Structures are given as C-alpha cells and as structure tokens.
Amino acid sequence: MYIKKHYLAIEFAFIAALCLLPPLFKGPEQYAFPGILSYLCSFCISIFLYFQCSLYGKYKKAKSDKKKTVLNASEILKFALNSSYFFLTFGTLIVTAVCINIFTVCLSNRAFSADLVPGENAANAASMIPAFFVSAFYEEVMYRMVLPGFLYYFFMKNPRSACRSKRDIICFYATELVSVLVFAFSHRYAGWASVLNSFIAGIALRKCYLKSKNIFTGFAAHFLYNVFMLCLLSIAHGRS
C-alpha cells in the first residue's frame, strides 16, 4: 500500500503538471487552436487513464461484492435512468449556455462563445467535430474521473463508506469544488463568461457521472452539446 500510494502520488504529479495546470494559465491572447498531434496525445492519455480507473474500480468492487446478480429488468431500468440523466444534463448545458450568452450580449453586445466560431484555424465546422469528440472524452475522464478520484484517494479516509466521518464529508465537498473549479478555469482562454458557464456545466456533468456511474452518459451529453452549440454559432456567423 505504501509503494502504491507513492506511485499514485507521482502519477498524479505528472498528470497535474502536464494536463491540469497548463490550461489554467492560458488567457485569450495565448490560446491557439490545437493541432492533430495534440488531440491524438490527449486521446491516448484519456484512454489510458480511463482503463486504469475502470480496472481499479472493478477490483475494489470485486473485493467488496462477493455475489453479483444480473437481472434483465435491472439492466433495462439502468438504461432508462442513464437516458434520463443524459437528457437532463444535455438540457442543463444548453439552458445554461443560452442564459449566459444572453446575459453577456446584454452587457457587452458580444456572446462569450463568439470566439469559438470556426475561422482560419479550422477549415469548417465538420472538421471540428472529431476534435470535439476527443476533447469531450478527455475532459470527462480527466475532470470527472481522474481528478476527483485522486483527491478522494489522498484526502478521504474512507471514500467508499456510506457512513462518512465529518472530516470525510468536508473533504468530499472540498474535493468536488476543487474539481469543478479546475475544470471551469481551464476554459479561461474563452473569457470569464465561459468560466462561469463551465463551472455550472461541470457541476451538471459531475452529478451525471455520479448518478449514472459511468463516464459515457456525461460524455454523450458533453459532445452533443458542443456540436449543437457549434451548429448554432456557425449559422449565426453565416448570417452576420
């Protein structure tokens, strides 16, 4: 356990230094549209971390659950619940973005997402869809699985127990807040309105992950939200 914890601490230090901290210091003037190599690296990193977290979670569950009963009815119910979480999360993301855009336009006569319209750095909207696919999966793994998971492991004494101590409850909310704030401020390159939008979206996506107990429900909502907003922005940009 001693070696394992120190190995995870070293791994988390690398993840923080290479993936989590750099976006926090990029303002609008420092942002450049990532290239193919950058997205390929992000996809490989997210795939590796996803399988690592999944295997660790299955190992812990296998140790605690001696018996496992598979029922068709329960699988159908799970699918229905995940579908409801998807639509609820997707709707929350859309409503939040629309409200913040309206508020921003009223204040500055410029939508916070205007800089995300495809321009010279992206050939067209279609070319950005694969990038959105990779970035949505990367962000869901990094900010919904990896970051909270590592923080739980290091700061909570018994994160899997239903009866947490007062210290664990405080650590739980602090960990959730830190994870959402890191996700929100990683979007500072798009302006402070985008940070606020990402903060609310981060709460919705994290709650979706906790409720659905899988990364793909939130990933689908996140990816389709990005595509939906891109389509709206492209239409609006074409008319202007």
Image: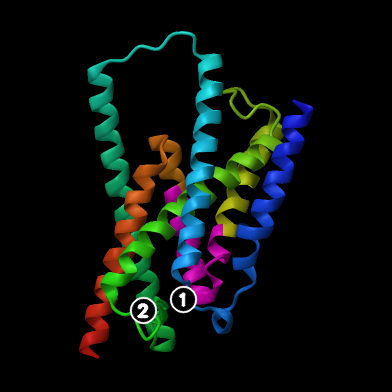
Q: Residue furthest front?
A: 37
Q: For mark 2, what is the residue?
A: 122
Say which residue appears at 43% left-offset and 85% top-offset.
107
Residue type highlighted by circle 1:
Phe
Where residue 202 appears, as percent x and y from the top left, is 48, 55
User: Which of the pair 158/117 is nearer the observer?
Assistant: 117
Q: Are marks 1 and 2 in contact (CB under 8 Å)?
A: yes
Q: Is residue 112 visible?
A: yes
Say which residue appears at 38% left-offset and 88% top-offset.
109
Q: Which mark is residue 201?
A: none
Q: Residue furthest bottom?
A: 240
Q: Which mark is residue 33?
A: 1
Specify the principal SS of the magenta part.
helix
Residue type highlighted by circle 2:
Ala
Which portion, as a residue range, is magenta? 183-205
Instruction: Report crowding for label 1: few under 14, some 14 to 19, many 20 or more residues within 10 A (C-alpha).
Output: few
Q: Residue 16: say if magenta.
A: no
Earlier along the polypeptide chain: callout 1 or callout 2?
A: 1
**Up-down relation of residue 20 to residue 110 (above or below):** above
Q: Residue 203: say if magenta.
A: yes
Instruction: Report crowding for label 2: few under 14, some 14 to 19, many 20 or more residues within 10 A (C-alpha).
Output: some
As helix, strand or loop, the secondary structure at mark 2 comes to loop
Residue 18, image quadrant: bottom right
Q: Is residue 155 visible?
A: no
Where residue 24 appears, as percent x and y from the top left, is 62, 67
**Up-down relation of residue 56 to residue 71 (above or below):** below
Image-based side of 190 in relation to 6, left or right? left
